[in-house]
Amino acid sequence: MEQMEVAMEALGAATSVHAVRLLRDQYQTLWSQAVDSTQVLEWNVQLNRWHDALIAETIRLCEQMLIREGWGHPPVRYAFVLFGSGGRSEQVQGSDQDHGLIMEDTTDSSVLEYFEHFSEVIVEQLIVLGFPRCKGQVLVSNSVWRKSMKQWEEQLRLWLEDLSWEHVRYLLIASDMRPVFGDEDLAAEWRALYANLLKRTPGIAEAMLRNTLYYKAPINSFGQIIRERFGEFAGGVNLKYGAYIPLVNGIRYLAITTGLRLDRDAFYALQQPSTWERLMYLKQNGSQDTELLSSCEMAFRSVLARRATIPFAIEEGEYVSHGYVTELDLTRDVVRALKKELQAVQGLQRYLNRQIRVQMRNER
């Protein structure tokens, strides 16, 4: 996309976050116009490349803000990382903030104070850019997600020593980590630490599987789509939590557990956290049912394209997207295609449920 290169060049010349926001607004409609279901993977790559650049430029400008305020340059190395759809390079036009920070080890309280202030500035400036706060508080301003390497090791060990549902949820969020600014070596060190701790934790696969199956495909045993019964989107279908998230969760689980079993490269699923790359890893590895993986591949392409067409809105200056296929959009052709997507998700979840039953039998 030639316009993308022009936008990137203009971004590099921005002198304030407000200027970056104007560029985002200027080029936002480009993405809606460029959606092509046959090339949705490339569209997704380019949109997320743009979002990465927007975020990285904002952090660079935040560093300059702190210098002007008298805080000075960052006192130690750090990596700003994305989680969630950003970590997987699967953001849509209305995605929110999901991020954290990895710092070089230090015991200097002034360094910790610097990064606490820096993190608050980053969150506020990303709001100026149009990215809403994460409702679940997966934010760099939350000290749970902002730590030195040693602190991160302590936090990961704490979660792994008590595999409660909430702790496993945090571990799964963390598995989608991807650096977008700062020291990439720190992020690589963090990833290796995470992988090694997982490998040494008995029962981690079973715990992850139970969390993975939390969201169910909204389709019944007769192949009928289960629609929302109440609220603003009554009659519609929650595409995000009914199709996209179950696919992401299931494929992530298969990729991580395959890596655990094969003990390969402290595993690829953490090095390449995108759902598509995880799918390709599973297909090349050949350790899962090929028909199941082909079905997941078809469904993921289709769901990604459908997510891309859900309109975004600007509310109080923030880009937001509801993630629903509305009742008005559920034409006969859409329902037919959506059924195929949900049946593929259902097939994946049945496959994973069978693994739970096998694990339960082995435990007896």
Image (cartoon, rainbow, N blue to C red):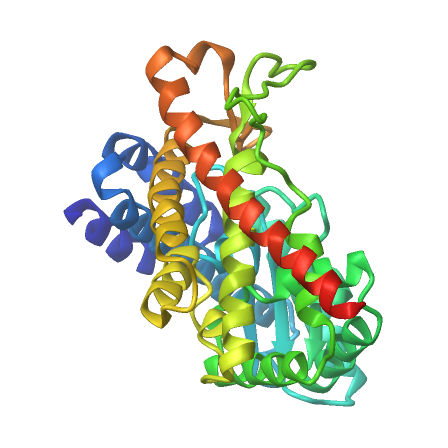
The percent coordinates of residue 265 (x first, y second) are 45, 85
Task: Name the quadrant containing residue 158.
Answer: bottom right
**Nearest to the observer: residue 222 or residue 96:** 222
Q: Which residue is outermost to the left? A: 2
Which quadrant is home to the C terminus? Answer: bottom right
Tell me what residue is drawn at x 37 percent, y 71 percent: 285
**Nearest to the observer: residue 153 or residue 320:** 153
Position of 26 with respect to 241 (left or right) is: left
**Nearest to the observer: residue 334 or residue 3:** 334
**Nearest to the observer: residue 24 or residue 234:** 234
Task: Name the quadrant containing residue 288.
Answer: bottom left
From this view, report whether residue 266 is shown above or below residue 299.
below
Badge count: 0
Say if residue 95 shows up in the picture.
Answer: no
Say if residue 161 shows up in the picture.
Answer: yes
The percent coordinates of residue 142 (x first, y second) are 75, 60
Tell me what residue is drawn at x 38 percent, y 35 percent: 308
